[in-house]
Image: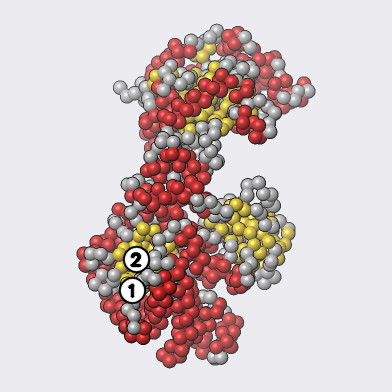
Amino acid sequence: MTKWVYSFGDGTADGQADMRNLLGGKGANLAEMSNLGLPVPSGFTISTEVCTAYYDNDEKYPEDLADQVSAAVDKIEDSVGGRFGDKEQPLLVSVRSGARASMPGMMDTVLNLGLNDDTVAGLAVQSGDKRFAYDSYRRFIQMYSDVVLGVEHHHFEELLEILKEENGYILDTDLSADDWENLVGQYKAKVQEELGRPFPQDVNDQLWGAITAVFGSWMNQRAIKYRRLHDIPAEWGTAVNVQAMVFGNMGDDSATGVAFTRNPSTGEKRFYGEFLVNAQGEDVVAGIRTPQNLTKEAREEAGDDAPSMEELFPSVFTQLVEVYHKLEDHYRDMQDIEFTVQQGKLWMLQTRSGKRTAKAALKIAVDMVEEGMITREEAIERIEPSSLDQLLHPTLDPDAERNIIARGLPASPGAASGEIVFNSDEAEKLAAEGKSVILVRIETSPEDIHGMHAAKGILTSRGGMTSHAAVVARGMGRACVSGAGSINIDYREETMSVLGQTFNKGDIITIDGGTGEVMLGSVDMILPELSGTFGTLMAWADEIRRLRVRTNAETPLDAETARKFGAEGIGLCRTEHMFFDADRIVAVRQMILADTLDEREEALAKLLPVQKADFVELFRIMSGLPVTVRLLDPPLHEFLPKTDEEIDDLAKALGADAKKLRHRALQLHEFNPMLGHRGCRLGISYPEIYEMQARAILEAAAEVSKELGETVIPEIMIPLVATEKELEILKGKIEAVAATIEEESGASVEYLIGTMIELPRAALQAGQIANQAEFFSFGTNDLTQTTYGISRDDSGSFLEDYITQGIYDTDPFVSLDRDGVGELVKLAAERGRVTREDIKLGICGEHGGDPSSIDFCETIGLDYVSCSPYRVPIARLAAAQAALGMTRVSEA
Ligand code: ADP
Ligand code: MG
Ligand code: MG
């Protein structure tokens, strides 16, 4: 015989805390609290296996379930001393849903089940309080009708309102016993009217109606949608908890409340919570009456007059504090508890690990280590790496006033205020003058990178969470609100209008990338706190992790930010981003448009000192830490102007023929630039470009080495290699440059030459390529594109279909595809190591900041991950978790 039903209460239980898969979270913890000897009203849990069996078997229950339920009800009766459906001593129960993880969409709790026209009279006699009895009955009819029968609340609320109005009552407490009795009659008539059948009077029908409603709610649309979003399998099922009622509405010595053992928003170790006198469960959160504070301290801080529980029920409060210590010590985590006081006696109704903000999570974890409650490793494991994002950006002062003018998607966290600017060049110009700007675009494209970089925040009227603006902003750590559709942007007039108001270039707005709000004017901000508990936890993570964490950075600002966040070097410096600066782009274009080698070299000569200066600055900031510089990667046409007007301007600037320019631009046009003349292929065709870059890198390294008094060893990285030969040729050119510099300076130069592994062929040929390469950096963005044969920028139109149909678990550009791309990475690492035992291995690209991908990097033994500056702390923590062997499912 299968055991479907698990009883609890009176200091024992069939179940326990670690049975949450079978009993659901609520049921397992009710059992555990019983086992701990805490006062828990007796009850039983129908297991999640019943839910599964029910759906596997055409929505029919296992045969022996009814008997087991009935026996469990008997057990409650024995414990409580009442009888279910009895006219004199009625037992009332609550029916509560409870899945493994608490889940919105599941059925609401039904209280006071077991009341009918007969038992209500018994309850009145038994309690000596008719008003209480009928108040409970009307609550039950309303709840049961709403939750189980589908007759909505408002029907009943209207009737209550009318009754109050007719009698001139203001508060519910003004109603007498007869008023409630009268209302119960009206409620029942309403149910009859809505359903064409009476409100169920048979208590067993009531019970099974509620049980079936709980199981039914497992398959309602909201629950299904939630499960899909959170990767919860339907097979998990929900449990049902049936439990003897205790009454917080039995007079002024009764109450109900919720409490946290520590403050869930700050993490402070202080008892925190609220309660209501003479009320039932839902009342506290329903907002009908204002709840009172639990502690005197909290009441005084809030300046409240209503007495705290500590003052009103001192002995119950003392008991509650004991329970709270017991629960925290037992679960070794902050608990969120629900309790009821019936005529001076405390009853525990729920406990669970409390939800908390990222800030509170850090503080609680660190405090608990210091209190000796948990280990450092446990503290590390308890923090969701991506939640740190909330802490790294400036945020709006919660007390500041805000004038919200629009809402979009919370695309990239953080808040930013600044002047509205409608184009990227201008954003860059104003930022250079020291102004804060918000770049406002209908949508952004790769040409906006410099403007996005310069801006404090980005606002778009079109595009989703994976639009260009959103992805790039997250990578850069810029605040971004995308897809604020109510905003109308006019580039020509340089205005944006919303809600009938028009705003001009230069007007100040504030965006909150964590909520999607757009506000008028500037709003006060709070800066991130990187010391304190954050610093402590990160230091523990650093002790535990094996993987090094570097950053992807090319600007001094990003490099500095990354160092502040704990980066241990640069894993990817994309030199082309340096080419877009206004003062260089002309020389870059001149180089691209050159007809002859001489002309090209002339342009390159102009670029050499600026590139060198860039590297000098980066090497200084990284003061001795490794820096990987990638030579020019994108196809050349990306640097050329697009419109006729811009081409004419350029022609003028260069003193060249516009027609010729147009022709050259046309020549450079490619059908598929991602697979075109780019990466090392540029170096093969125009070696002088790579030679110039190599010289800039090596001279800069020599200069900074002298300054620091220690050797800076730059890592020169050649992109998009597919064959050993490509690398061999280009390596030869760089070595020649190095030899010349040595000759010129009389000093030796040290450097490493390596490659990005971003093509499947390169991964397969890694053994050969390692003959040339001293390091590999896995460029998994492009490797994912080329392995799947999918262009990331074009994947938006179908990726969603692939994810909803379960073809992909997650977006492979967010979380590394272990089975395909990951296999290639693993194989390349192995083959590379066979050829060159000490080859340095790292990963750059967005996966380097994704916890699940970082876990993969740990398992295959890479040396480092490299990610955008704002993800560095996330990567440090994720690397520590990976070292602890903790696997996280993707957070996408
Ligand atoms: P949720 O999952 O939404 O928290 P619960 O099942 O915890 O729902 O029920 C909500 C509230 O109902 C509880 O906080 C508690 O106050 C009240 N409640 C549930 N069962 C009982 C009971 N047996 N006696 C008294 N109140 C109860
Ligand atoms: Mg609850
Ligand atoms: Mg690439």
Q: Position of residue 224 (x, y in %)?
A: 47, 41
The quarter holding residue 703 reads bottom left
Which one is earlier in the sequence, the residue at label 1 or at label 2?
Answer: 1
Decide if residue 216 is in sight here.
no
Front residue of 356 and 206 = 356
Within 10 Å of disc 2 (Cα), the crowding (few <14, some 14-19, many 20+) is many
The quarter holding residue 632 reads bottom left
In the picture, the disc for residue 751 is 1
Front residue of 724 and 560 = 560
Q: Is mark 2 within 8 Å of ligand 3?
A: no
Q: What residue type is labelled 1?
A: Tyr
Q: Position of residue 881 (x, y in %)?
A: 37, 48
Q: Where's the N terminus, which quadrant? A: top left
Residue, far left:
834
Disc 2 secondary structure class: strand
Q: Position of residue 833 (x, y in %)?
A: 24, 64
Can you identify the residue that label 2 sits on?
777
Disc 1 secondary structure class: loop
Please name the residue shown 64% across and 55% down the image.
Answer: 518
Please name the residue shown 32% across and 47% down the image.
Answer: 885
Rendered position, 162 above or below 843: above
Q: In this view, does 801 lie to the left or right of 258?
A: left
Within 10 Å of disc 1 (Cα), the crowding (few <14, some 14-19, many 20+) is some
Q: Position of residue 217 (x, y in %)?
A: 49, 34
Rendered position, 489 above or below 370: below
Please name the residue shown 42% across and 39% down the image.
Answer: 369
Please name the residue shown 43% across and 60% down the image.
Answer: 567
